[in-house]
Amino acid sequence: MWTEKYRPKSLDEMINQEEIVTRLKRFVQEKNLPHLLFVGPAGVGKTTAILALAHDLYGPEYRNYIMELNASDERGINVIREKVKFFARTAPIGDVPFKILIMDEADSLTADAQHALRRTMERYTKTCRFCLIGNYSERIIEPIQSRCSIFRFSPLSEEDVKRCLRMIAEKENVEVSPEGYDAIYEESRGDLRKAINLLQAAAAAAGRKVDAEVVYAVLGRVSPGRVREMIQLSLKGEFIEAREVLRSLLIDEGMAAEDILRMIYSEVMRLDIPERLKVRLSDAIGEVDYRLTQGSRPEIQLSALLAKLVLVGEEMRSGGAALD
Amino acid sequence: MAEQPWTERFRPRTLSEVVGNEEAKGRLLEWLKSWEEGIPKKRAALLYGPPGVGKTSLVVAAANDLGYDLLEVNASDYRTARRLKEILGRASTQQVTVTGRRRLILIDELEGLSGREDRGGVEAILELIRETRAPIVLVSTVYTALREAWEKKLRELTRLSLPIELKPIPVVEVVERLREIASRVGVEVKEEALEELAIRSEGDLRTAINDLEAVARGRKHITLQDLETLGLRDRQLYAEEALRRLFTAKTLQEARGIISSTQLNYDELIEWIYENLPYILDDPRELLEALDALARADIHRARAERFQAYRLLKYMFDELAGGIALSMERSQGLLRIVKRHLKAMGVPLSLFNLEERPEGVSIAPVKYLGGETWRKVHIAVRALGGSWDREGRRWIVGYLRPPRIALRYWWSRERRRILRSISSKAAVKMHLSTSRAIRDVIPILKVIFQSDAEMAKGIAEWMELDSDEIKWLSKG
């Protein structure tokens, strides 16, 4: 995959987040590291930065010195603790006296689990540095934050994203029209991983000649596209068909209801409807989001939301005040 | 020799043959083993759960496995305290039989004791439990809707004994068991028919086996159609009846009465209503209102089950009854929905004779349609779950369709297994969580695998995908 092929190997190759990169390089020079907390939206280089740092610090065999865990894939804090214990029980050979444990999606851990994690961090500080990665620093408990150097990653600029896409397109012999780049950027915004994935899928779909139309065609086939289709069907009043799409997302695509809901939310925010209505819908989406945690059937809850969208569509057509 | 019914013939002899309810199995076993170290605190275990999930089978199999001599009585057969004591009193004072085997007492059909008249019976059982030196297992069928009353009635008994709950058997496991039985008796049953039998049984394995036996009489091959001829359409009839009455109910009280008198259990009721609401309510506001009520009903259900606070179920029933029954005012039902779908396909309604018939909405062409139009109509009809009736030369869209959720999950289980395996490979290679891989990477991979063979080949090698996974991504 191009996201991996072109992932910067060394801090020197990173094209953005200059300030962060400079600070990280200093750690490499000193061969010392505090615990790190990387926060920022998806696809802006958080994982890349820590992998590149490890590469620069330990050399090409850096994989022997790091362990990657994803908090949302691990079964509970105890499993995590066991893995850390096993990993950190020995100091590495060489002139760097510690290993690095990378914990992605650390902000998905509950507060209790984070407290347990904090104790583990302290216990193994001698032989192991932690790099916690997440989207929001507010979701990381204060005691962890205060023990870490915090790095805030910002979304990539349009220019940076396009520069990177151009570089890849050139190396892969893909012709991309300016509108093609626009369309990819419009969909992915500052999320470079999404942008590169989209470029690769579009290049595959169109025999390496990519324009806006190809990008939109591909988008229609990936999940955000299906969610959009589902919302459009609802707004048109085709509830039964919209529900079928929902089922196929849940069952055939195996998507989590929470993920579908998140996409619905961002689609709704992009809809061309009165702002006041968006707030009302946001409230309804929030209610469903809460209910999903309560053990009710996700499909029924999401369907009720689709029915709400049917009504919005109906009222928009008739010019009435929806949902009042 | 007269043939035994299949439920007897295939009754499990050992615990390993008992289908499902692993947790209950473990708890019963653990409790029985604790008797080896002397008399435990709880001298009786109370196995309870819906009908046909294998409560008695579990006790019989456990006794076999652990080498107990089983003394079995039916609570309702010995309604007086004196009779029960006569039968069980002596047995319960001895841990072993004359032949040296340990003894296990099974009191079945506890639900047959009624609180008031059988006071003596309950008292006698309580006394037995307090004094017994041999393990006693009580077995009771509990219908979920009546659970509150049941708990109240047997409070004393549940306090003195170790409660062990048995749950309905999952569809998947019922299917497996039916398949096994079918192959042992040499009957070939189509997969859809097995699934239909399993789904209709609602986790009641005994009913499923009985139904299978009934259908298999005089047949060597069984298809989905064969089920229909055998009066197995009860669920559909119950559901039709309940939903029809529900939507004509005028008051909350009336609706509540309908809900509580239906033969469907509440899970089924929720699923039937959910499946069919959009085919009944064509007015968007009413559809929203009803779905909202259903969603709230399901929340009450989830809370009741999660916290085992079954008194909360009454709020669920209220939402189901009032919320849904009273939502229908302007909606005109399926006929209008059919018309809208035909119009959406660009088919003029003047080509047909459209009418409501007992079996559903009938769409009869009044003239020759031509292949193109026929196909369009067919697509619209299929989307609504209808079909072409060759003899009647018309399409029929039935009023109700059975819930499909469980079935669809079952059908796609293999797909989902492969999906999980691909996404965990992707997660490792691309430094992501598996759920993010499912969301962000899998769709991209699909596009690539379905359009660029060369690129796909490189990725497959890099990700170390096996041939099933490659096929999955390439087929979509």
Image: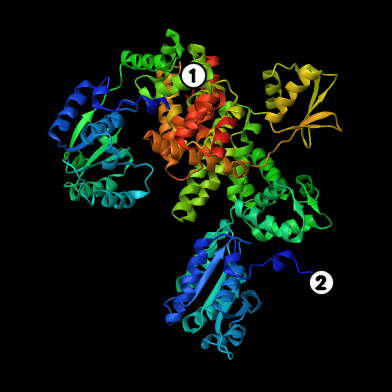
Asked whether residue A219 is in view, the answer is: yes
Identify which residue is drawn at 21% across, 34% down. A57
The three-letter code of the residue at mark 1 reads Ala
Q: Which mark is residue A202?
A: 1
The local secondary structure at tag 2 comes to loop
Q: Whole-Å distance between the Cαs marked 1 and 2?
A: 69 Å
Here the colouring is: rainbow
Q: Quadrant of residue A190?
A: top left
Residue at horizontal 52 percent and vertical 70 percent from the top: B46
| B99 to B305, vertically: above or below | below
| Relative horizontal placement of residue A207, taking residue A50 as reference (left or right) | right
The subunit letter for the residue under badge 2 reads B
Q: Could you tell me if residue B290 is visible in this image?
A: no
| x then y, percent, for residue B76 | 64, 74
The percent position of residue B464, horizontal first and vertical second, equals: 47, 37
For label 2, the residue is B2
Quadrant, the N terminus of chain A: top left
Q: Position of residue A241 (x, y in %)?
A: 61, 28
In the image, A137 versus A88, the foreground residue is A88
Q: For this view, does B318 lie left or right of residue A168?
A: right
Q: Quadrant of residue B241?
A: top right
Taking A36 as reference, is B250 left or right? Answer: right
On whether disc 1 and disc 2 are found on a single subunit, the reply is no
Give above or below for A252 relative to A90.
above
Instruction: Identify which residue, B384 or B75, lies in the foreground.
Output: B384
Give the amino acid at mark 2.
Ala
The residue under the point 43% across, 18% down is A172
User: Residue B231's mark?
Assistant: none
Where residue A229 sits in the image (x, y, percent)? Answer: 54, 23
Q: Tell which residue pokes out farthest to the top in this image.
A: A178
